[in-house]
Amino acid sequence: MKKIIINADDFGYSPAVNLGIIEAFQNGVLTSTTLMANMPGSDEAIQLAKKHAGLGVGGHLVLTCGKPMLSSNSLIDEQGNFFNLNEYQEKRNEMEDAEIFEEWCAQIDYLLNNGVNLTHLDSHHHVHTFRENYEITTKIAEKYQLCFRNAFGLEEQLALPCQKAITGFLDLMDHQEIRNLDATFASRKKECLAEIQGVLNQVEEGQVTELMVHPAYVDEILYFHSSFNVQRVKEVAILCSTELKQVLETQDFTMYHYGNIQS
């Protein structure tokens, strides 16, 4: 048996992102998502999470997008926004570790205090896996007793307290045909599904593997604030397709989220 978690990043980014994620869960194969507490669609996403109890919901910790939830000196630009990813790389040495820790705690606490039963944690742009943030990631895991996405060999570097032996981490959709915006999924099904099959072939028997996705519809918030926008619509179509459902069923994949995988 091959066990997979299909996790959508960026729940809460905007109303259109929320809509795409819920569509991929209700009518597709999505099993899990992670919620950004600091973004414009956050409160709506919290309510949607409560209405869809079967969807596993984790916390998507943010350091490189939107505004912080706490007042900050070292984490923000002149407009009061987090530095973008490129700026983060330049500014990280000037950032206070204590401010990052407290900000991430505030984001997690906001979700918990609003009734979200968190299944796990990860981070926008995978910053929790960056070496300079290892100590912060460890402190967060110890404080909240939640597992972190095991991306880029994180568990080989850190002894975290609540990991669930989710050994694999793969991007399901970041491939040429799927990202091609000159053709619909419907017109290039064979090619798109071949790329997905290449990912599924890497899932090991008896192991649990997370497959990362980014389904969304597009509104002004996503379009004007992220360079990765229109491509996400195609992911909704693929995740909801009969063909992908049949592939997973016929190849004996079992679907999980972080909350129903035993430690």
Image (spheres, rainbow, N blue to C red):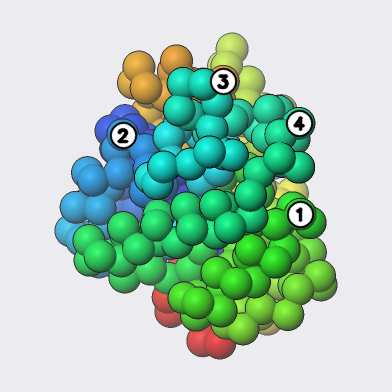
Question: Is there a contact, CB below 8 Å, between mark 3 and mark 4?
Answer: no
How much space separates mark 4 and mark 1, taking CA atoms? 13 Å
Q: Which kind of residue does numbered mark 4 sit on?
A: Glu
Which residue is identified by label 3? 227
Give how far apart the Cα atoms at labels 2 and 4 are. Answer: 26 Å
Q: Decide which of tag 3 and tag 4 comes sooner along the chain.
A: 4
* Badge 3 or badge 1: first in the primary sequence: 1
Residue topped by disc 4: 90
- The answer to the question of whether label 4 and label 1 lie on touching residues, with beta carbons closer than 8 A, is no
Q: Residues within 10 Å of mark 4 (few under 14, many from 20)?
A: few
Amino acid type assigned to the residue bearing label 1 in the image: Glu
Foreground tag (2 vs 3): 2
- What secondary structure is marked by label 2? loop
Most extreme residue toward the top, as rendered? 182
Give the label on residue 218, or none: none
* Quarter that holds the C terminus: bottom right
State the SS at label 1: helix
- State the separation of the CA atoms marked 1 and 2: 28 Å
Q: 80 left or right of 209?
A: left
Which amino acid lies under the numbered mark 3 shown in the image of this protein?
Ser
Could you say which disc has been placed on residue 132 in the image? 1
Residue name at image x 54 percent, y 52 percent: 99
- Could you tell which of marks 1 and 2 lies nearer the N-terminus? 2
Q: Residues within 10 Å of mark 1 (few under 14, many from 20)?
A: few
